[in-house]
Image (cartoon, helix red, strand yellow):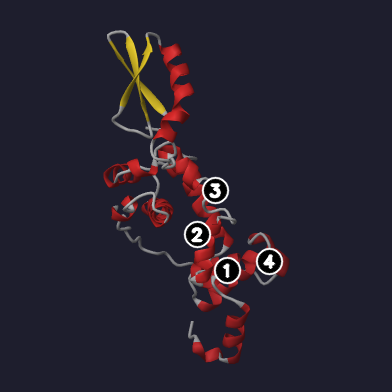
Amino acid sequence: MKTPYRFWNRNGKYSVMFAHTPGKWVATGCDNRDDAIRWAEANRRDEIKVHHKIPTLNEFAKGFFVPGNELWMKRLKRKKKTYASDYFKAHQGRLDNYILEEFGCRLISSLSTIEIDNWFLDLQSIRTEKELSDNAKNKVLHAFRIVLEEAKYQGYVENNVAASVEEINEENRERQHFDDLEMKKLFPDDEKELLRIWQGLKWTVFFLIMRDTGFRPGEVAGLTRSAYCVFRANPDTHSG
């Protein structure tokens, strides 16, 4: 339920169910929809507060992957887990565009494994409205698991219900290699043309490393200056 509440008209009187309390209908005493909407808007925040101060997903997770989330970020650093800034930016996008869009107005404690599983399997791209790839769906689920694991750590929920959702087994597609002519077009000898093709020095170097070493994208992204020094001192350590 993406809207914060929905109505049920019985015998001319409206009842409302708030998204953060699924299954609980509350009588508004109103006999027309406009008055019922005003009643729901006036009482929605009070309804949330009544529930033992458990936050909605929006309240708990807004800006979760933005640098400055002290509790979670500090623990990552203490555990010596470091990620590139793009990792957090991508997860924040998944959180905002998919997870909070669907479940943001719900109390964290009201979420269930089965509804997350059903939603996750049918995810569509917000840009193309076509079904997301298996890989993209799994990444959205991974972001959801991180958020709910933190909710569990802070004591808002007993279990991370997203952790019980199985990832999709991705189907491997046959890879097609570039031939010599295509590689020559991608990596011309002329430096200016090379920089034009790859849109700057950063990506030029990135893909040249992939070409020359056989490293995968994540391995290239994880390289540091110290790793370069090791390879330079021991050129035979990698046979790519």
Q: Is residue 208 above or below residue 29?
A: below
Residue 55 placed where, x, y %? 44, 42
Residue 233 falls left or right of residue 46? right
Front label number (4 vs 3): 3
Front label number (2 vs 4): 2
Name which residue lies at 35% across and 44% down.
109
Q: Is residue 104 above or below residue 152?
A: above
Front label number (2 vs 3): 2
Residue 239 placed where, x, y %? 48, 86
Q: Secondary structure at mark 3?
A: loop
Q: Earlier in the sequence, mark 1 or mark 3?
A: 3
Residue 158 placed where, x, y %? 32, 52
Q: Is residue 163 above or below residue 237?
A: above
Judging depth in this view, the residue of 26 and 170 nearest the camera is: 26
| Residue under pointer 2 | 72
Residue 216 falls left or right of residue 230? left
Q: Which mark is residue 201?
A: 4
Q: Earlier in the sequence, mark 2 or mark 3?
A: 3
Tell me the kind of residue under disc 2.
Trp
Name which residue lies at 38% across and 54% down.
152
Q: Mark 1 and mark 4 in contact (Cβ < 8 Å)?
A: no
Tell me the kind of residue under disc 3.
Gly
Q: Is residue 155 above or below residue 25?
A: below
Front label number (1 vs 3): 3
Q: Secondary structure at mark 1?
A: helix
Is any part of residue 117 visible from this angle? yes
Front label number (1 vs 2): 2
CA distance for labels 2 and 4: 34 Å
Q: Earlier in the sequence, mark 4 or mark 1?
A: 4
| Residue under pointer 1 | 207
| Residue under pointer 3 | 63
CA distance for labels 4 and 1: 10 Å
